[in-house]
Amino acid sequence: MKISPNKAYLTLSLFALASAAPVWGQAPSAAPDMLIINGKVMTPDGWAEAVAIDDGVITRVGTTADISSLASPTTKIFDANGGAVLPGLHDLHVHAIGGGLEQFSCRFRPAAPPAEISKAVAACAQRAKPGEWIQGGNWIANVFAKGQQTAAFLDKVAPNNPVILSDESHHSAFVNSAALKAAGITRATKDPVNGKIERDGKGEPTGVLREAAMGLVAAVVPPASAERMTQGLEVASNLMLSYGITSFSDAGLVPESLKVMSDLSRSGGMKQRVRGCMRWNPTDRGGEGESLAMIAGRQRFETARFKADCVKVGLDGVPTESHTAAMLEPYHGSSEKGMSSIAASVLHPAIINFDRQGLHVKFHAAGDAAVRNAINAIAAARKANGPGGPLHDVAHASFVDPSDIKRVADLSSSWEFSPYIWYPSTITRDIVAAVGDQRMVRWIPIADAVKAGNLVGAGSDWSVVPSINPWLAIETMVTRQQPGGSAATLGAGQRIALADALRIFTLNGAKVMRHADLVGTIEPGKLADIVVTDSDVFSVPETAIHKIHARWTFIAGEKVFDSEAPPPSLAGVTR
């Protein structure tokens, strides 16, 4: 028996067979230790009202009356009061430690004008000791007048401190003269491989560094301590829990951050189910030896909820004014086609090797040429190792040639789109100017991928984007407008249905992370990774979805977030 979602609820008989079967570790007659009642419960078969959970496992789903009858005097009961009860959400692309550390950095509003940036850096300089590094962001190029964004701009307000500020994509940096001096960058310094030092008409560095050139300065910045990184990760983890994110993939770990993430998971300070993607780049200044050693030693860092089973590979930059994303056709008004970071002769053998080991590969591929390079590498791995390997994902995929859409499904792989930059915003205005209006018609072609039968996931890329709020992402996947609605849309033909958006953030994410046997749906036998929201996502206007809040978040039946008692680490954190 199946009742459609528009009839709102399932009857008990829908679950009679499943609920009659004993659950491992529990006698069939035992009372559950917790119930969630009076909710709109999303199940694979439609809507229910309540969920019974025992020892972290979902045991029964049905009506509130039916499930309430199972309670004992010790059963904890959570009244959803009409809110949605959904599987825990998955974010497939997070830079968690960096995002947490940014909460302690020199910050200013996204798209802040030059005067505001100057004021913020001046205030940070006043608090800093002489010679202490000032780090922060995130700036956007189009706020500066021509010739204004120079090292001298920052020198005026921070003459005694080296400054490095990331742009909105984290693929460019803005530094002052002290930072250039500390890194030894002069007019004689050559551009590094896959990097660019912007220069003025006299050949002098302006203070803007692209891609690998950022590393010249980053290499001399004192690294954060393990204690500070742990503090940042705790903030990031709790922030994600406050939105209902119970699983995430961290996209780009190095040895120090891998250990911090492993240690916090082992101690129970990070509750989520996490996939750690270890950074591999053969063009790094120190070569790939450190990356390969980290990958070879990955088993030492795995915990019950943390798996280091993924490799992050960057194939290009970003399609902003930097022109570093690898495109099949030149940028608007330019002959440039961007940067392809790794030659096929190096990339293919590496991906074949990772695939053979059963390691998931997450490709950073923003431009359509980089997307094709990623797909070709997956094809080489399938040819060498056969089918059935990891569900490698092509991440970002801002631009995709139509002929490449179906290839990902044919290769049993997945797409990971970035839902926080597919609506009209300051970031996308830069991108429109860089690529032209025509290519924006199919900007982030999520609808095409869904229609072609692909496995589609979503990743925020936080803290590259200013918010990790998945409800903002879900709304704008559906509307392609600014949060709250707008006359302007971006790639309107790539809108998807709300049901598809929720599936992308729940079951699809679980499939990509290879734990859909445990979580991703609400049904008997699954672990109780669940978010209860303050309102029903299917009842509010589409343009109000971004306002939805998590009341409670549960992982394996443990309440890990309560909106009425948020963790102290979130005090003062920008949400």
Image (cartoon, grey):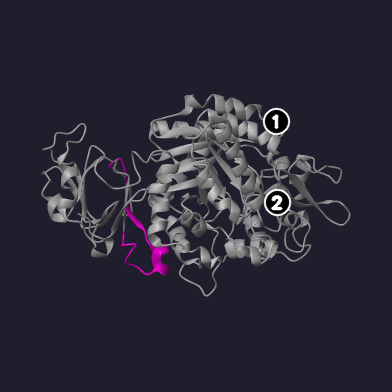
For the residue pair 10 and 263, the one nearer the viewer reads as 10
The N terminus: image quadrant: bottom left
- Residue type (three-letter) at the residue carrying disc 1: Gly
Q: Residues within 10 Å of mark 1 (few under 14, many from 20)?
A: few
Please report the residue visible at 50 percent of the width from the left and 54 percent of the height from the top: 449
Q: Quadrant of residue 268?
A: top left
Disc 2 to disc 1, how far (Cα)? 22 Å
Q: Report the side of 168 relative to 196 (left or right).
A: left
Can you tell which of label 2 and label 1 is closer to the viewer?
2
* Chain part drawn in magenta: 534-557
Q: Position of residue 323 (x, y in %)?
A: 71, 55
Q: Which mark is residue 286?
A: 1
Q: Earlier in the sequence, mark 2 or mark 1?
A: 1
Q: Secondary structure at mark 2?
A: loop
Number of marks: 2
Quick check: 201 left or right of 234? right
Residue at the (60%, 53%) spot, across then down:
403
